[in-house]
Image: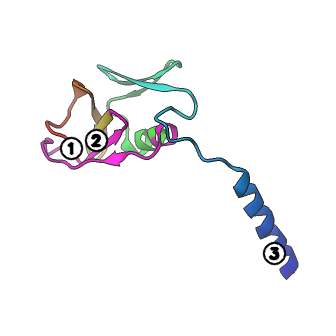
Amino acid sequence: MRAASVAVVCIAMMLTACVQPAAKTGQSRQGVEFAPDANGLAVLPSAQRVDFGRSPKGVIPALTRELGKPKVLGLTGCPPTITRRMQWNDLELTFTQERFVGWTQGAATAGTTCNSIS
């Protein structure tokens, strides 16, 4: 019984070693691009979208899966309704407790955003 348990653990470790983590180069793992627009984010080259009003529970994992771990920013300069502010490369997203509400990329913005980077 113990030998079988050891064998299962060894096989699991070998399979884990074969999995390569996604590159953190700023490129999307699946080759998609998140293009900010007046209504949220277009997911190119598909017709899918991540529009304002979506739950952070769906938006944050999707971008993290494709773009890597975000930088969590402070809330200085944000309206009181903003409870979370995250940045992937040069794309910053703002959230209320329950909704994706804005983005900033360079000098361009849409939705509800913050006035300063912290």
Crowding around mark 2 (Cα neighbors within 10 Å: few <14, some 14 to 19, many 20+) is: many
Residue 81 image position (x, y, % from top left): 18, 43
Q: Nearer the viewer, residue 86 or 95?
A: 86
Using the image, tell me which numbered label, if any, was put on residue 95.
2
Whether residue 65 sits left or right of residue 108 in the image: it is right
Whether residue 108 sits left or right of residue 25 in the image: it is left
Q: Nearer the viewer, residue 114 or 54?
A: 114
Q: Are marks 1 and 2 in contact (CB under 8 Å)?
A: yes
CA gap, disc 3 and disc 2: 46 Å
Residue 73 image position (x, y, % from top left): 26, 47
Q: Earlier in the sequence, mark 3 or mark 2?
A: 3
Stretch of the chain drawn in magenta: 64-90
CA gap, disc 1 and disc 3: 49 Å
Residue 94 highlighted magenta (yes or no): no
Residue identified by numbered label 1:
82
Q: Nearer the viewer, residue 82 or 11?
A: 11
Kindly identify the residue that appears in the image at 27 percent across and 34 percent down.
101
Q: Amino acid at mark 2?
A: Phe
CA gap, disc 1 and disc 2: 6 Å
Q: Is residue 8 depicted above or below 64 in this figure?
A: below
Q: Nearer the viewer, residue 68 or 59?
A: 68
Please state, as top left, top right, bottom left or bottom right, where the N terminus lies in the image: bottom right
Q: Earlier in the sequence, mark 1 or mark 2?
A: 1
Residue identified by numbered label 3:
5
Residue 87 image position (x, y, % from top left): 33, 40
Question: What SS does tag 2 mark?
Answer: strand
- Image coloring type: rainbow
Question: What SS does tag 1 mark?
Answer: loop
Kindly identify the residue that appears in the image at 53 percent across and 19 percent down.
46
Crowding around mark 3 (Cα neighbors within 10 Å: few <14, some 14 to 19, many 20+) is: few
